């Protein structure tokens, strides 16, 4: 609901989803109706389901994305997946720098930056995640922390076509807590300014997503905040009715 930018609601299934879960994905594809005219829809399932879901999504208005990629295109990296492989399986974008990757795997901004460039090399847009911890917010450092993450995680060469930014305060992820609309506005205004300062006219076109405990009940308020161009949704993206309920605020 801002500025001619087409919003996107992306669902991050994290380490959830087995073959049986394709029922929910099918219901999303079938239930999306003409929503795709107003908002881009994407589900990032575990990599094991990308191939199946991308076939199911054929001709529908729900895209399929990946949750992470390696920095290299191929090689001796047991258990890892490259952006090329994810694209080959049917992914249309890849999340990089999610706070769970940063925390569980010690991923830092430099690695996230490299992963974003790996995504681009495979012609996949990168959804680059940033966000402060609870301690950082409590000590009033959230803008400084996010500012540093943005400058170090986003590679030079980012454009609105190859990069989406997701602001996800770590303390709001999976907790049911969200910042106030005013706090989201302060952060998203800040992120927009950082992007225009660095990328000039392009900066105005980046999609800036809010993520962290987005649900059908709070989506309308959060998505109405200036400079919020969609959502990155975890838990509530596992159920078709919730996911479509969130995306439905753009109908
Ligand atoms: P949540 O997760 O919606 O379950 O809070 C958000 C995310 O991690 O992207």
Image (cartoon, rainbow, N blue to C red):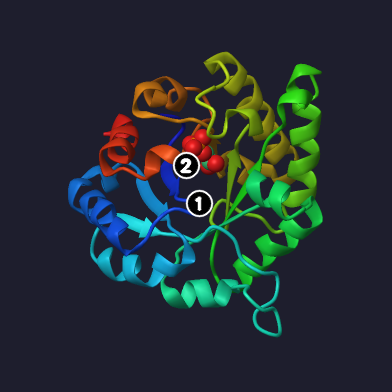
Taking 17 as reference, is 11 above or below it?
A: above
Residue 115 image point, x, y percent: 68, 63
Taking 40 as reference, is 248 above or below it?
A: above
Give the residue drawn at x 66%, y 55%. 158
**Residue 130 in view:** yes
Q: Is residue 73 left or right of residue 136?
A: left
Q: Are marks 2 and 1 in contact (CB under 8 Å)?
A: yes
Residue labelled 1 has its Cβ within 8 Å of some atom of ligand 1: yes
Task: Assign the C terminus to one quadrant of the image.
Answer: top left
Residue 170 image point, x, y percent: 65, 34
Residue labelled 2 has its Cβ within 8 Å of some atom of ligand 1: yes
Q: Which residue is mark 2?
A: 234
* Figure label count: 2
Give the residue drawn at x 36%, y 49%. 41
Q: Crowdedness of circle 1 by 10 Å Cα count: few (<14), some, many (20+)?
A: some
Viewer-closest of 2 and 188: 188
Q: Crowdedness of circle 2 by 10 Å Cα count: few (<14), some, many (20+)?
A: many
Residue 186 image point, x, y percent: 64, 20
Q: Is residue 130 left or right of residue 27?
A: right
Kindly report the distance in space between the C-alpha atoms of the residues bearing marks 2 and 1. Answer: 7 Å
Taking 48 as reference, is 110 above or below it?
A: above
Q: Which residue is mark 1?
A: 14
Residue 184 image point, x, y percent: 58, 23
């Amino acid at each position: 609901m801002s500025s001619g930018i087409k919003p996107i609601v992306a669902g991050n299934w994290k380490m959830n989803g087995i073959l049986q879960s394709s029922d929910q994905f099918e219901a999303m594809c079938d239930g999306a109706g003409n929503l795709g005219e107003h908002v881009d829809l994407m589900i990032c399932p575990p990599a094991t389901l990308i191939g199946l879901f991308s076939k199911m999504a054929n001709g529908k208005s729900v895209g399929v994305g990946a949750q992470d990629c390696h920095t290299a295109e191929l090689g001796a990296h047991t258990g890892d997946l490259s952006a090329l492989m994810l694209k080959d399986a049917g992914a249309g974008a890849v999340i990089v720098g999610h706070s769970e990757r940063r925390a569980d795997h010690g991923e830092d901004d430099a690695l996230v930056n490299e992963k974003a460039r790996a995504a681009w090399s495979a012609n996949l847009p990168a959804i680059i995640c940033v966000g402060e911890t609870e301690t950082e917010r409590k000590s009033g450092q959230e803008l400084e922390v996010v500012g540093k993450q943005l400058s170090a995680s986003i590679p030079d060469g980012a454009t609105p076509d190859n990069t989406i930014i997701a602001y996800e305060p770590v303390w709001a992820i999976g907790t049911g807590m969200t910042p106030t609309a005013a706090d989201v506005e302060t952060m998203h205004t800040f992120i927009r300014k950082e992007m225009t300062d660095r990328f000039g006219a392009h900066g105005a076109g980046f999609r800036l997503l809010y993520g962290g405990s987005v649900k059908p009940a709070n989506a309308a308020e959060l998505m109405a905040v200036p400079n919020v161009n969609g959502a990155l949704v975890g838990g509530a993206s596992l159920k078709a009715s919730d996911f479509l309920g969130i995306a439905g605020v753009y109908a």
